[in-house]
Image (tube, rainbow, N blue to C red):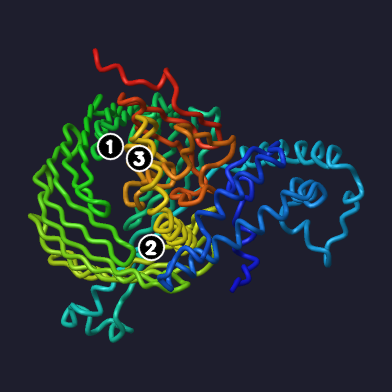
Amino acid sequence: MATALSEEELDNEDYYSLLNVRREASSEELKAAYRRLCMLYHPDKHRDPELKSQAERLFNLVHQAYEVLSDPQTRAIYDIYGKRGLEMEGWEVVERRRTPAEIREEFERLQREREDRRLQQRTNPKGTISVGIDATDLFDRYEEEYEDVSGSGFPQIEINKMHISQSIEAPLTATDTAILSGSLSTQNGNGGGSINFALRRVTSAKGWGELEFGAGDLQGPLFGLKLFRNLTPRCFVTTNCALQFSSRGIRPGLTTVLARNLDKNTVGYLQWRWGIQSAMNTSIVRDTKTSHFTVALQLGIPHSFALISYQHKFQDDDQTRVKGSLKAGFFGTVVEYGAERKISRHSVLGAAVSVGVPQGVSLKVKELEKQRESTATDILQKKQEAEAAVRLMQESVRRIIEAEESRMGLIIVNAWYGKFVNDKSKKSEKVKVIDVTVPLQCLVKDSKLILTEASKAGLPGFYDPCVGEEKNLKVLYQFRGVLHQVMAPDGEALRIPKQSHRIDTDG
């Protein structure tokens, strides 16, 4: 009946998080957690073939975790070397003869070194290279004027613009991040560059602020202030104030964006910009696994326009995308179509053809470089596994809720896990908060919920929606008929209910 687990599945799981036990858990705690999950995932409890198959996979994974952690020798080896250290062939592990205490001490030392390296490496570098090629002569030639010129029989195609940009981030503390960025641009023989430095501070679970300083040879010094705030779980606002210094004096600018999640894949934006290129803009962006659609309308100085664009995402290993857009305004009409494809682990190559009236025809070639970005297929696989676990929990959760309601115990009203602060510069990314109400309710026992000091992404029914970013767990629960609320950073232990979580209704 049992199916073998792949090596990839084993390597992607944390046994302690899977069983929801401390790294110092006793054998009794391990046994209790193992029995609880076996009852939840036992294949014989499910008649549906699909659910039975999913339960079988999870049941075997829990059994594998318990077998490793219940044996003192294999547990000590796992603590320091991970799952690969348990393989008998291909690894020469001298420390297997050492005591568990000695191996654990070395593991803790290596863990501290790994955390230090991780902090140093989290610079998140990003770069963009784009090239514009003027191909108007392919479609609209002035043959009468150049008929006597040598070589005039061949169309003239030239590079008329290029843009290069790069940015890096450096976390200073748990709440402060420094960002350094620069860019170089050239168009029709004229070029210039700029450099910017920003300091961002997360002020609360609902917002952050950022100070920006910049300078360039085309424009004078720039001083800016950005503020972000979550108004509701589905609505946020961003305000950007800027002072641009130039030979003409100081040019102030103000931009405010109000956004609302219309559904899990669609966001609506209202933007008002005053000062530099004043305008009012409204747009709707829908982003799904297979497509990206945008419709926008802008009224402003000097440009007013209407825009509609569509991008189709192929579900292949190269993450191929094709796109098309139509933009019409006082400046004329532009039709653009193109495609992009992943050419390496960190690079994407794209090309687009732009046909405009009266602009002409141009070809754009773009290369994007992204470091340490988790692929969409990995996140999708983890999401599907979490959803399968949640379906298996439904019956158990129903019984737990009935028991808790009968004694006015602990009821999880809503729970979310992920990144709650949405960076405006990454607004096109997928939703970064997931609903974990059912998995948390399933962990409630005797009106108590205890989560150990480990990443919550490894818990049954959870997955990491934003790999490499700071995450939190937000829980709204009811205990003895009174609402409570808590937000806990990922990796920290959590125990509920607590008196300090109680929501003060008198205010």
Cα separation between marks 1 and 3: 11 Å
Mark 2 vs mark 3: in front: 3
Q: Is residue 503 above or below residue 191?
A: above
Q: Left or right? Give the position of 254 relative to 320.
A: left
Tell me if label 1 and label 3 are in contact, CB under 8 Å: no
Q: Is residue 60 above or below residue 245?
A: below
Quick one: quadrant of the N terminus?
A: bottom right
> Looking at this view, is 44 or 156 the one in front?
44
Tell me if label 1 and label 2 are in contact, CB under 8 Å: no
Q: Residue at x 88, y 59 (%)?
A: 92
Answer yes or no: is residue 192 visible. no
Cα separation between marks 1 and 2: 40 Å
The amino acid type, in three-letter code, at marker 2 is Val
Q: Which residue is mark 1?
A: 233
Q: Which residue is mark 2?
A: 131
Cα separation between marks 2 and 3: 30 Å
> Looking at this view, is 211 or 414 the one in front?
414
Furthest-top residue in this view: 506
Horizontal and vertical percent position of residue 17: 59, 45
Numbered disc 2: secondary structure: strand
Instruction: Compare marks 1 and 3 and give the one earlier in the sequence.
Output: 1
Q: Which residue is mark 3?
A: 422
Q: Residue at x 75, y 37 (%)?
A: 108
Please identify the quarter of the rendering in which residue 27 is found.
Answer: top right
Q: Residue at x 38, y 39 (%)?
A: 403
> Looking at this view, is 450 or 230 the one in front?
450
Q: Is residue 382 above or below residue 457?
A: below
The amino acid type, in three-letter code, at marker 1 is Pro
> Looking at this view, is 210 or 6 the one in front?
6
Instruction: Compare marks 1 and 2 and give the one earlier in the sequence.
Output: 2
The amino acid type, in three-letter code, at marker 3 is Asn
Numbered disc 1: secondary structure: loop
